Image (spheres, rainbow, N blue to C red):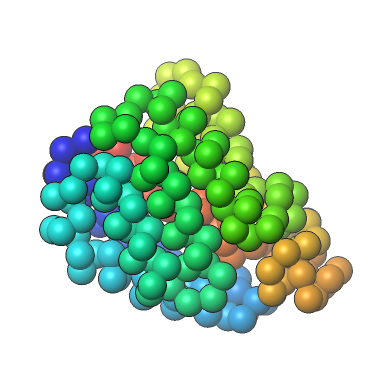
Amino acid sequence: MDEALKKKLIEAMAGTVVAHADELTALDQAIGDGDHGLNMKRGFEAVLAETDTIVAKPLPDALKAIGTTLVMKVGGASGPLYGTLFMALGKELPPDPTIADVAQALAAAIEAVKARGKSDLGQKTMLDVLAPLQAALAAGGADLAARLPAVADEAAAATVPLKAIRGRASFLGERSIGHMDPGARSSALLATAICNAIGA
């Protein structure tokens, strides 16, 4: 996990969020405040602006720095939730992690996100993507970087028929059914960006 790979990962995540900002906004306009795409774009543009400082740090500290930036720059619920995710990963991961380390750290990060959002699986949130990703990582096997994007996309699509229990979308009740959760989609996009950057 050298500086070049860390820079590649940050650029991949930021580039993906910026490229899909309008899509995330449209998803959020259907069941939320309509600001998820803009907020995520602002957050990751701020991370991108700090790339040189962040990549000079060991991986755990780099992840914590990303998390801190997202908390400060991303509005709404997404900032604290994504910030918690990255900061928890930074707390749990060693500087040069194995796949098993990543699976274990993501499990701990998911628990931290659950606590921060007072949410759980099946409630139409980013957790509904993070948990299947963690399960796939824990199961291991060949070609993980190639397989995980499909896991993430299927998990995000699986939020469409769910009724939102947490967050702004929960105010809509039954009307939240039939729409993909914006946080689930952004989580899937980030996972795919990371996998593509590592696999390339």
Drawn side of residue 198 relative to residue 160, left or right: left
Q: Residue at x 58, y 80 (%)?
A: 34
How many labels were placed on the picture? Answer: 0
Q: Residue furthest right?
A: 174
| Residue 199 appears in view | no
Drawn side of residue 2 relative to residue 46, left or right: left
Drawn side of residue 200 relative to residue 21, left or right: left
Residue nearest the viewer, comparing 187 with 82: 82
Q: Residue furthest top?
A: 141
Residue nearest the viewer, comparing 21 with 71: 71
Relative image position of residue 23 (x, y in whole percent) = 51, 70
Quadrant location of the C terminus in the rendered image: top left
Relative image position of residue 11 (x, y in whole percent) = 25, 56
Quadrant location of the N terminus in the rendered image: top left
| Residue 136 appears in view | yes
Relative image position of residue 165 (x, y in whole percent) = 78, 62
Relative image position of residue 104 (x, y in whole percent) = 49, 30
Q: Residue at x 34, y 53 (%)?
A: 64
Q: Residue at x 48, y 73 (%)?
A: 37
Q: Residue at x 29, y 57 (%)?
A: 65
Residue 174, by quadrant, is: bottom right
* Image position of 103 with respect to 187: above or below: above
Residue 71, by quadrant, is: bottom left
